[in-house]
Image (spheres, grey):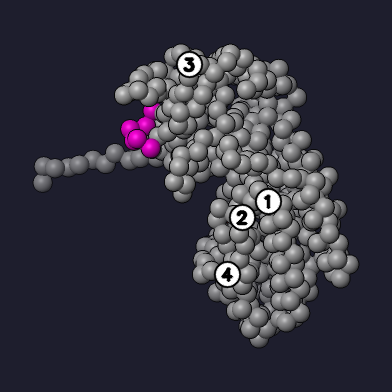
């Protein structure tokens, strides 16, 4: 544990907590920048990086990454509008998701985004009809493939299984006639996403090779040009003791090898990798304040003002043994560990455990604690309305200055959405 964790670009966490209140998400733009650059430097020039807003939909985070060169991968109407308002050029936006509605498809067409990534033949036909109504020529479509191969290495394996995502690879092979009958769309690419949290570079390289091969195969059989191949991403970051970060040098080497031969056969084809977690996770810290420190049958609990309603990932769903995110003591960073604490939040459920039995310097009520590597799938993937707490404030530190990039939800805002009806019980 380093004293460094207690400040960001010269702003002490204590000051930030004082100024913006807790619980609080703090993002360090220097880390966002460094992570993006590191990735950019290792990727072949032919590969474009698209930021998956799902991981952290904050408009300033999106704008920051876009200003450094990242496009956007969006999956809802609001994410699309967020990316556009953040300044992402339409040609650098793709829209995917298994349940797009007509409003979303229309917005894609109106904005003129790079392509809609379609996940069923029905969806392609809907899009075709919608474009026809608007008389807009042919709209670019990328086919999302549910690959016939599967991969290990991801916590969430895709491919080779029945899935609501994409179109089965075997199925697409038979689509020549169906697609040729549609005059208002233009299939021009292939997309596949093999899962998330990959930490072995070999798995990612292997996936990429398979996806590029499948894309060439499908384009050849079905007869469409290969103008874009989006080979997913799913690059992980290490959260737990038993994990290590990706070997980026080896990943870069592998990806350069796989894409070089592909690019030679498909000159001009745009390659895209879409990444959420990898780009933002390490830049974020969830900051909470200890309210009570109490004992129960031999275990010491720190009850903090923030919990899993803002950081559901810390619950560790799906794993049998509770594994802890990296926790830092922000008020006493340089003191040696004193004992083990279980860090819990304000929710009335025994599942509201951020970390179980972590070694920390002594914790007293009022101390600040940070959950590191929390810049991805934090608020966006958490039940913020549980117990009507609402979502926390978010702060981005850039060039040494702390900017509030999201207001904390207020009680009035939360209640505004509800309607107290007039129960006329007299009749
Ligand atoms: C969730 C998702 C992403 C982003 O995944 P990360 O693991 O956060 O990089 C990209 N593409 C698709 C299709 C997704 O579902």
Q: Are marks 2 and 1 in contact (CB under 8 Å)?
A: yes
Say whether disc 2 or disc 3 marks the residue closer to the N-terminus: 2
Q: Are the residues tagged 2 and 4 within 8 Å (C-beta)?
A: no
Residue at label 3?
363
Q: Which mark is residue 154?
A: none
Which numbered disc, 4 or 1, marks the residue closer to the eye? 1
In reply to whether residue 280 is colored magenta, the answer given is no
Front-lying residue, 63 or 130: 63
Describe residue 427's horizontal placement relative to residue 374 as left or right: left
Residue at x 72% of width, y 27% of height:
398
Task: Decide if residue 69 is in sight here.
Answer: no
What residue does disc 2 label?
A: 153
The residue beneath circle 4 is 160
Q: Is mark 3 within 8 Å of ligand 1?
A: no
Q: Decide: is 184 above or below 344.
A: below
The mark that comes first in sequence, 2 or 1, is 2
Q: Residue 350 in magenta? A: yes
Q: Secondary structure at mark 1?
A: loop
Horizontal relation, residue 50 to residue 334: left or right: right
Element under disc 2: loop
Reading the image, the residue beneath label 1 is 200
Residue 103: quadrant of the picture = bottom right
């Amino acid at each position: 544990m380093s004293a460094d964790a207690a400040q960001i670009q010269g702003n002490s966490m204590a000051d930030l907590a004082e100024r913006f209140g807790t619980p609080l998400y703090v993002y360090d733009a220097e880390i966002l920048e460094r992570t993006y650059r590191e990735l950019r430097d290792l990727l072949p020039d032919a590969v474009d990086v698209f930021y998956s807003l799902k991981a952290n939909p904050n408009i300033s985070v999106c704008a920051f990454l876009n200003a450094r060169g990242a496009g956007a991968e969006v999956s809802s109407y609001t994410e699309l509008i967020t990316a556009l308002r953040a300044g992402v050029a339409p040609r650098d936006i793709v829209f995917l998701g298994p349940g797009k509605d007509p409003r979303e498809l229309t917005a894609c067409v109106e904005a003129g985004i790079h392509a809609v990534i379609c996940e069923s033949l029905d969806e392609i036909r809907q899009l075709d009809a919608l474009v026809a109504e608007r008389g807009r020529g042919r709209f670019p479509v990328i086919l999302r493939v549910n690959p016939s191969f599967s991969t290990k290495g991801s916590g969430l394996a895709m491919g080779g299984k029945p899935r609501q995502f994409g179109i089965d690879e075997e199925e697409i092979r038979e689509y020549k006639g169906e697609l040729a009958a549609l005059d208002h769309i233009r299939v021009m690419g292939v997309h596949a996403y093999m899962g998330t949290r990959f930490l072995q570079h070999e798995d990612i390289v292997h996936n990429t090779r398979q996806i590029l091969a499948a894309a060439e195969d499908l384009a050849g059989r079905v007869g469409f040009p290969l103008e874009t191949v989006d080979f997913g991403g799913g690059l992980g970051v290490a959260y737990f003791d038993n994990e290590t970060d990706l070997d980026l040098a080896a990943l870069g080497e592998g990806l350069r090898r796989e894409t070089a031969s592909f690019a030679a056969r498909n000159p001009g084809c745009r390659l895209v990798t879409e990444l959420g977690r990898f780009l933002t996770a390490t830049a974020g810290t969830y900051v909470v304040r200890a309210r009570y420190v109490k004992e129960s049958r031999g275990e010491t609990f720190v009850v903090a003002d923030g919990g899993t309603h803002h950081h559901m990932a810390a619950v560790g769903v799906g794993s049998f043994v509770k594994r802890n995110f990296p926790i830092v003591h922000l008020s006493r960073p340089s003191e040696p560990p004193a004992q083990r604490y279980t860090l819990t939040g304000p929710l009335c459920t025994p599942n509201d455990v951020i970390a179980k039995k972590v070694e920390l310097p002594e914790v007293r009520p009022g101390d600040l604690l940070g959950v590191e590597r929390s810049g991805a799938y934090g608020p966006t993937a958490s039940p913020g309305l549980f117990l009507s707490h609402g979502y926390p404030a978010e702060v981005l530190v850039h060039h040494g200055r702390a900017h509030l990039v999201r207001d904390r939800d207020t009680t009035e805002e939360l209640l505004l959405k509800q309607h107290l009806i007039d129960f006329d019980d007299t009749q």
